[in-house]
Amino acid sequence: MKLYLNVPYAEKDEAKALGAKWNNKIKKWYIDTRFENYIKFAKWILKETDEAVIATEYIYIIEGEQKCWRCHQKTKVIGLGIADYTFIYGEPDEAQYEINIDDDILHLAWTYNERDIPPKLLKYLKDHYSVKTGYSKTIEAECFANHCDCCGALQGNYFLFDEPTSPLSSDINGKNLINRMSKLKIYGIPIDDDLQLNWDLSFGDNDYAYFEYGHFEELILSSNPSDYWITYEELYHL
Ligand SMILES: [Zn+2]
């Protein structure tokens, strides 16, 4: 699979010697190799983080609905999601990896910083949902969040992504789990290249239920009608 790396100019020869290739159009280094070989390039993957999630095949939008805390009207809320991924962690010179593919389990994800979302996906989200960076009184800081479709009030990230009572959470059991999950729409965006995404992932025992009971649909983001999978180039360089 292809994975783009942030290689500083001074380290380009080192990356090249290890097998990285140069995309002259977007001026960026990438590797095109098996997941197992990603750790050879851990120096650039783990540059700003001590663990990296690299999504493969699809990234997801999980869409639900909740009552706005301020105006009490129903409003759409979304989360992001990752299912198949490679996890890379540890010290760059002795990095470890874990491949999580083909287990059909979707994990809810989010980021407080909209810069962590590929620009083309971010534009799609802003065009279709009331998401934006706004000021949260709870955390007393700016953060990327859902806002009410009716009154514009910020719908707290903590509630949506960390509370079991959230309409997007799978942290509930039995019939209630089926009820909640069957109200969700799950949009899978086919991606051509692997994507290192600095999103917070939540892992729950019932995460299988997103695919089991949610309504799945594919979402083709590529603007070229003959391309089913969207490339890194297009996601990041509109
Ligand atoms: Zn409202």
Image (cartoon, grey):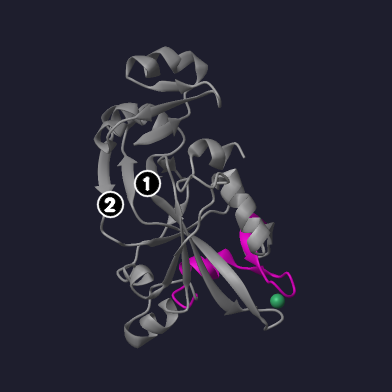
| Up/down of 165 relative to 207, above or below | below
Q: CA distance from mark 2 to mark 1?
A: 8 Å
Instruction: Say few, some or many: other residues with alpha carbon within 10 Å of mark 1 (under 14 / 14 to 19 / 20 or more).
Output: many
Q: Quadrant of residue 78?
A: bottom right
Q: Please tell me which residue lies in front, 204 or 207.
A: 207
Quadrant showing the C terminus: top right
| Up/down of 231 relative to 108, above or below | above
**Residue 156 on the magenta segment:** yes
* 120 to the left or right of 31: right
SS at mark 2 in the image: loop
Please name the residue shown 33% across and 52% down the image. 84
Q: Which residue is mark 2?
A: 101
Q: Which residue is mark 1?
A: 56
Q: Quadrant of residue 95?
A: top left
Please name the residue shown 41% across and 84% down the image. 179
Amino acid residing under circle 1? Thr
Residue 140 seen in the current view: no
* 40 to the left or right of 214: left
Q: Which mark is residue 14?
A: none
Q: Check whether the beta carbons of the residues at disc 2 and disc 1 lie within 8 A of each other.
A: yes
Residue 136 seen in the current view: yes
Q: Quadrant of residue 195?
A: top left
Amino acid residing under circle 2? Ile
**Sequence-earlier tag: 2 or 1:** 1
SS at mark 1 in the image: loop
Quadrant showing the N terminus: top left
Please name the residue shown 73% across and 69% down the image. 152
**Mark 1 C-beta to ligand 1 under 8 Å:** no
Task: Tell me residue 222's x, y (percent).
Answer: 54, 47
Which residues lie in the magenta part? 140-166
| Up/down of 141 relative to 198, above or below | below
